[in-house]
Amino acid sequence: MTRNCWVILGIILIIHVCCPAWVGAQPADSLTTRLLAYADSAKRLRDTNRDTEAFALLRAALHNARHQSSKRGLVSLYFQLGLSERKRNQYEAGTLALLQANRLARQLNDTVQLFRVGYALGMVYNDQGLYTESARHCHATFGYCTPAYPKNDSLRVSIMLASIYRNMGNKALYQQYLDLAIHLGRRSKNLLEQLFAEFQQGTRWEEEGKYQAALNTRQHAMQLIRRLPTADQAEYMTNNLTGLARMYRKLRQWQPAENALKEALQWELRYRSVATQALVYTELAYLQADQGRQQAALQTGAQALLLARKTNRPDLVQPALEGLLQLQKKYGRFEDALSTTQELHKLTDSLATVAKMKAVAQVEARYKVAAKEGTIQLLRQEARIKQLEAETRQRELATVRRQQYGFIGLTIVLLTGLGVIGYLFFRTRRLQRQAEEQGQLLAMQADELQQINATKDRLFAIIGHDLRSPVTNLQFALGELALYATHTPAQASLMGQVSDQIGHLGRLINNLLYWSLAQQGMLRDRMEWLCPDSLLSDCQTLFADRIQRRKLTIATVETADEIWADEVQMQIIIRNLFDNATKFSPVGSTIFVNWERSGATYSVTFINTVDESHSAAAGSNLGLNVVDELVKRHNGSMTAQILPDKQWQTRIVWPLLNEELLRKTTIVEMA
């Protein structure tokens, strides 16, 4: 293997060691980092004039990364490849590489890369003499020189445009962009850019014949050079001192000019550039000729020509020959001048031939580039057509897939609907069967209720006729016995108890009878004005034996008011309340009966003392239930509660007279 191959393999190995993954299976960021490392290594090789190694490294990197997804890394590789091809004078290949980098940079919309690639395209087209294309790309790069991208240097673009328009012979645009470059350089904070602006301004003053202004500009540039790093001072100092000596010579200041050239030669010892030495000796020869130092001028001119020939650069040999020819003619060295003229003609003819060949090569390169660009466009169109066909097939496939999914979804919906309908039908049938069973059960229950009601009606008929009549006869016989028979006190007491129990049984039968009539809706209301005191007196007379036997005291408040009620029902209400109060009151206690009118309502309150064992029974017997039912028929209400000191209060409230009572009374009277 050659030395170059070992160098390339070493660089690739270093890059693979520094990066964590191989190209084929690494993430996009890692791949980009590796490709940028390749591009940076190639740039360093090219800067050290190792162009072949840089070119081979870029080719190897592009071969491995061509099918990868890192466009940013590929832009840098194609950019460096284009610059390498330009340095190798392969302008066609360099143009194609830079156009590929420009296409990828536009896809990424990377402003920095678009600036770099556009500027490089301008240089390549300028080298080929395609000034129009070069100017177009340089003008396009101006759009990327904004404050948001400070690295995009508009000064370099201005310099390139000034050079292009100078080559095109457009002095107006040349001056415009030269002024812009000088303005930008002086405003820049970069010393090299400021120094370049001073060089351009000095050259401009020299072209216009303003030698003093050019001298001042060169002196100011000298101050800027001294501020540069030591390693960079030699080249700029040598060139600036040569220009400074030329200005002194134009102003015929021989001694300062000679001092400047001597200092330039001292700096040249550090820089060690044969081309720069040739320029210095050429300028020194002109100075010696102006001073009249004939022999020294001829020797220096010959030495400058010798140095220029060592560089193999026609652009340096031709000025050296012209300077020596001018000196030889001036001092009468015509034979030497003839040989120098012949040599100059040969060089001029060769340069013209080279220029013609270069022009032909440029035309051929332009044709090849255009042909390749056309081929690339055709391939892109074919690729676009294939892409559109693939997209169309994908859309058709997606449409068919959506239709399939739609059919499947519709089938699922229909099956689900049928299942729901079947379930609802089954549930409806089951509910119908349950409703029929419940209807049959309700019919059976209705029959049973009718039988129970019939049994209840017969029972109430028995109570009303079969039980009531014997109890009435017993009460009548017991009353006759009490009137016509003589009894001992014990017999009289026993007779009172029997009479009391028979009366209680009769009231119980009456309560059952009225309660059954009320439940059956057969009870009729006969409303009239009644005296409360007479109702209470009748009850006291009825329960006189019990009151006397239990030694009870009845405390009443007489009232002159009348109440609107059914007399029979009101008698039953007062009788049951009186019966309840006298039955559960302790011996010797007092029963309070209070009639009270409050607004449009009337109330009667019974308060008596009871034992705790009798309180529950007092509120749950049949008499109170009958009272509650009859009071509600009068649109009233009944409340029963235990008061402090073991007292039981029963209160009945009903309206004095209202439309409902009048309507009931009217209906009864009509009946």
Image (spheres, rainbow, N blue to C red):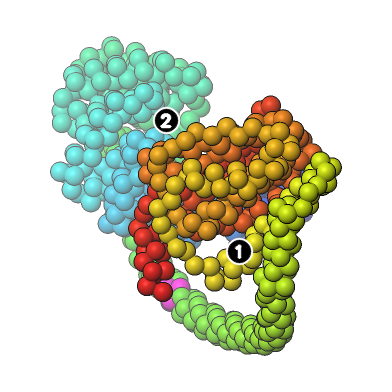
Residue type indicated by callout 2: Thr
The C terminus appears in which quarter of the rendering? Answer: bottom left
- Residue visible at 32% across and 20% down? 221
Magenta-drawn stretch contains 378:
yes
The N terminus appears in which quarter of the rendering? Answer: bottom right
Q: Secondary structure at mark 1?
A: helix
Asked whether 506 or 668 is in front, the reply is 506
In the rendering, at what x and y percent does residue 154 appear? 33, 38
Evaluate whether residue 125 shows in this view: yes
The span picked out in magenta is 377-382
- Residue visible at 48% across and 38% down? 595
Reply above or below: 244 against 503.
above
Asked whether 277 or 13 is in front, the reply is 13
In the rendering, at what x and y percent does residue 528 appear? 41, 57
In the rendering, at what x and y percent does residue 142 appear? 31, 45
**Residue beneath disc 2:** 276
**Residue beneath disc 1:** 514
The mark closer to the camera, 2 or 1, is 1
